[in-house]
Image (cartoon, helix red, strand yellow):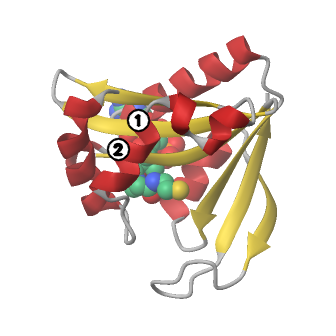
Amino acid sequence: MSGPDVPAMMAIETQANPSPWRAHDFDAFLADPGQAGEAAAGGIRRAWVYADPEVRGFLCAVAVAGEAELQAIAVERSRWGRGAGTALMESLLAWTRGQGISDIHLEVREGNQRALDFYARFGFTVVGKRPRYYQDNGEAAILMKRNC
Ligand SMILES: CC(C)(COP(=O)(O)OP(=O)(O)OC[C@H]1O[C@@H](n2cnc3c(N)ncnc32)[C@H](O)[C@@H]1OP(=O)(O)O)[C@@H](O)C(=O)NCCC(=O)NCCS
């Protein structure tokens, strides 16, 4: 992923997420890691796009102190169910293996059954719940984790 991918990623994100990342969120994610708080703590940010060659999906993750957090994943709605999400997740898993990361964490809306099923298929299990976490509709966040 790089700066020129941002408009396509924003279009996908806006379609897929009720509280989408905005341009400044993507720009901050892609900014020089030397300016990021995570980097100061020894963290690394990585992002991948799935392209055919048009950008159809993306995944953003941060690794800090031997643990990773999946911060965003989305695939263009018309391309769901064709393996793009799987390819993105496999890129993340290959990277975490190479980094010696022990666990991957994520948050997902309680009502997002497709994403919950998708994550479970990759071995993520529910480890907690934050009631009324999402401000736009008061939905709970389900916390999931996968041991690497
Ligand atoms: C969750 C999400 C990223 C999954 O992406 P995806 O590209 O649809 O995922 P995949 O196609 O790899 O896999 C999903 C399903 O398609 C099936 N599939 C994979 N490759 C396939 C293929 N070539 N042909 C047919 N089906 C296929 C998988 O078996 C899977 O089905 P299952 O979950 O019933 O087992 C996508 O639905 C999305 O963008 N959702 C909105 C954003 C979102 O909710 N993000 C998570 C926020 S926490």
Whether label 2 touches label 1, CB < 8 Å: yes
Identify the image quadrant of residue 8.
top left
- Amino acid type at image mark 1: Leu
Q: Under tag 2, what secondary structure?
A: helix
* Numbered mark located on residue 48 in the image: none
Local crowd size for mark 2, using a 10 Å CA cut-off: few (<14), some (14–19), many (≥20): few
- Amino acid type at image mark 2: Asp
Q: Splitting the image into four quadrants, where does ligand 1 fall?
A: top left
Residue drawn 52% across the image and 83% down it = 135
Q: State the quadrant of the C terminus.
A: top right
The residue that disc 2 covers is: 27
Q: Is residue 63 above or below residue 119?
A: above
Q: Is residue 22 above or below residue 95?
A: below
Q: Position of residue 1 (x, y in %)?
A: 35, 27
Local crowd size for mark 1, using a 10 Å CA cut-off: few (<14), some (14–19), many (≥20): some
Q: Nearer the viewer, residue 82 or 11?
A: 11
The residue that disc 1 covers is: 30
Q: Position of residue 118 (x, y in %)?
A: 55, 47
Residue at mark 1: C-beta within 8 A of ligand 1: no
Q: Nearer the viewer, residue 9 or 29?
A: 29
Q: Position of residue 86 (x, y in %)?
A: 48, 31
Q: Position of residue 79 (x, y in %)?
A: 25, 42
